[in-house]
Image (cartoon, rainbow, N blue to C red):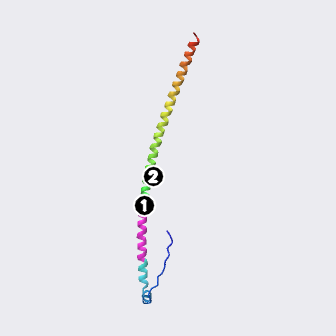
Amino acid sequence: MAPSISIGSAAPSWAAGANKKKSVGAVVDDEAELLRRRNAELEREVEALRLELGAARRRAETAEEAEERLCVQLGDAEVEALELARAYQAQVQALAAELAAARGAVAGR
């Protein structure tokens, strides 16, 4: 919070006596009212911050759930890629064996 600066204003001479007559009880009441207003203002700010925090928590939970779903999808994609790679490797080995047998048959003629 920024510091505040208080600037007094000149009061007419007839009003100077009125300020001196203010009782201690009135000053305490004024300060109490000022503190009540400040307290109410702070309570409103706290409530606004609580709402903001709740919204941020909900966004974080949503992001965490999305991350979990993406991790599951990535895991599934990795499993599928590994299965495809193994199947491709097996097919390449089978074709290599077939090619070797064909070359052997051609060489044997």
Q: Quadrant of residue 48?
A: bottom left
Q: Quadrant of residue 22?
A: bottom left
Q: Nearer the viewer, residue 20 or 109?
A: 109
Residue type at mark 1 is: Arg
Rate crowding at label 2 as few (under 14), some (14 to 19) or many (20 or more) other CA atoms within 10 Å: few
Q: Looking at the image, which residue is at 53% across and 27% down?
A: 89
Mark 1 lies on residue: 50
Q: Is residue 100 above or below residue 2?
A: above
Residue type at mark 2 is: Ala
Q: Which mark is residue 90?
A: none
Question: What main secondary structure does the magenta stretch of the protein show?
Answer: helix
Q: Looking at the image, which residue is at 42% across and 57% down?
A: 54
Q: Looking at the image, which residue is at 44% across and 55% down?
A: 56
Q: Which residues are magenta?
A: 32-52
Q: Nearer the viewer, residue 10 or 105?
A: 10
Q: CA distance from mark 2 to mark 1?
A: 15 Å
Q: Secondary structure at mark 2?
A: helix
Q: Looking at the image, which residue is at 43% across and 62% down?
A: 49
Mark 2 lies on residue: 60
Rate crowding at label 1 as few (under 14), some (14 to 19) or many (20 or more) other CA atoms within 10 Å: few
